[in-house]
Image (cartoon, rainbow, N blue to C red):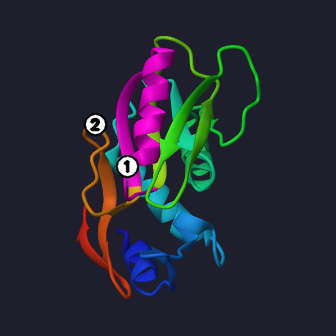
Amino acid sequence: MLDRLVQSLETCPMIKRGEYNYFIHPITDGVPVVEPALLREVCTAMIKVLDLNGVDKIVVVEAMGIPIGSVLSTMTDIPMTIMRKREYGLPNEIAVHQATGYSKGELYLNGITRGDRVVIVDDVVSTGGTMRALLQALEIAGAEVVDVCFAVQRGSPSIGRPYKSLVKIEVAEKVHVVERYL
């Protein structure tokens, strides 16, 4: 399992953003094209590693958490909510600040109620900034985070709680998968 993910990561294009080596991949960027078999492989693996027992909602972050969360929601019949990059002004909307190695801004959470048991899924964790912001918003909302899983882990960032990933990578002139968890 995860052969498609590993092969696609190790052959994906790279660009520089300042001093940051940025890899371009269908799961993390939606570029050049997201193949259904790759997305299915990632979601099937996540179902195997996540604790989904008694979970009320899947929580994802805009943008690339959306395809993963959508497929996962469809496969498990667990509703999904999306942490967005723009304000909607709905009652009980929670705004938090997010800063990563290459961006910063506000994120907005809707659709979570006190006592919800949630899992978080996302495409990649590299600095942990986005996930720390999401965890803060979920704490404010009064949700219980049951589990967290990323398709790709870059380095060993701290998000303030344990998490799972499908593969761990190192990035230099190219991506090298150093661990796979299935």
Residue in the image at 49% along x and 75% along y: 18
Mark positioned earlier in the residue sequence (2 or 1): 1
Q: Are marks 2 and 1 in contact (CB under 8 Å)?
A: yes
Residue in the image at 49% along x and 26% along y: 137
What is the span of residues highlighted in magenta in the rendered image? 124-150
Nearest the viewer among 69 and 105 is: 105
- Does the magenta segment cover residue 114? no
Q: Is residue 24 above or below residue 146?
A: below
Nearest the viewer among 18 and 120 is: 18
Q: Amino acid at mark 2?
A: Gly
**Residue on which disc 2 sits:** 160
Residue in the image at 75% along x and 20% along y: 90
**Residue on which disc 1 sits:** 128
Distance (Cα) linking label 2 and label 1: 9 Å
Where is residue 27? Give x, y as percent.
53, 66
Residue located farthest toward the front when viewing the structure as drawn = 18
